[in-house]
Image: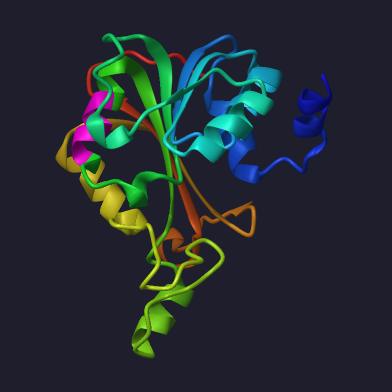
Amino acid sequence: MNNERNVQEKTVRSDFSLIASWVAPGARVLDLGCGDGSLMAYLRRTRQVSGYGVEISIEGVKASIVNRVNVLQRDLESGLADFADGSFDCVILSQTLQAMHRLEALVESMLRVGREAIVTFPNFGHWSHRWQLLRGRMPVSESLPYQWYDTPNIHLCTVKDFDHFLAERHYRVLARQVLADDAPVTFLPNVFGQLALYRFQRSGTSADKA
């Protein structure tokens, strides 16, 4: 119980709170790239979800176990073939998008095994990143803390990029929120937003509001 209490006592990240508001109580959830399992632990406590985390690093797997999260050690680049169609109500990819090689295939798989998907990512279009590029340097920020030579990020994108990605594939956007300093951004989100959060599904799929 001490580990569960530690998760509860941590300051709740604004993106965790927003994601939780999009997940129906009792939903079956798959969290891809779950890291230390903090998000799944939070969803279990606040929304009584069940499901699994998927993580490649042994450190993340061990931390997830400490957080009492059911975790599978898998490389997401190999796909989600282990999961049957429609196994989950919601599949989450939280701040992992930018590190994936085969993102399009992964998103397609997310919507195969889950009724809907939630994706979050740092917005490369933020004004501070634009300013650093104008000065001739690759951006380094709180949301993108790596130097160009040691970054795990492969596919950096902007809010507009992801809007176009979803529209091109005719995915239905159920909700979108862009945050900066833990607060919603409504004016020029592609310029002033630091973190983008999307909830979407295939077109023609019925959705119940969380």
Residue at position x 50%, y 34% from top?
34
Q: Report if residue 35 is visible in the image.
A: no
Query: Which SS type dominates the magenta stretch?
Result: helix
Give whichever of 53, 118 is nearer the camera: 53
Say if the magenta span includes residue 106: yes
On screen, residue 159 versus residue 13, left or right, reads left
Total number of numbered discs in the rendering = 0
Q: Is residue 138 above or below residue 58?
A: below
Residue 17 % position (x, y): 64, 35
Residue 90 % position (x, y): 43, 20
Q: Quadrant of residue 68?
A: top right
On screen, residue 155 versus residue 196, left or right, reads left
On screen, residue 148 versus residue 184, left or right, reads left
Residue 119 % position (x, y): 40, 38
Q: Residue furthest front?
A: 58
Say if the magenta span includes residue 192: no
The N terminus: image quadrant: top right
Residue 184 % position (x, y): 58, 51
Residue at position x 50%, y 60% from top?
194
On screen, residue 54 versus residue 173, left or right, reads right
Q: Residue furthest bottom?
A: 135
Residue at position x 45%, y 59% from top?
189
Over which residues does the magenta segment extend? Answer: 104-109
Q: Residue furthest left?
A: 168
Give whichever of 114, 148 is nearer the camera: 148
The coloring applied to the image is: rainbow
Q: Report if residue 36 is visible in the image.
A: yes
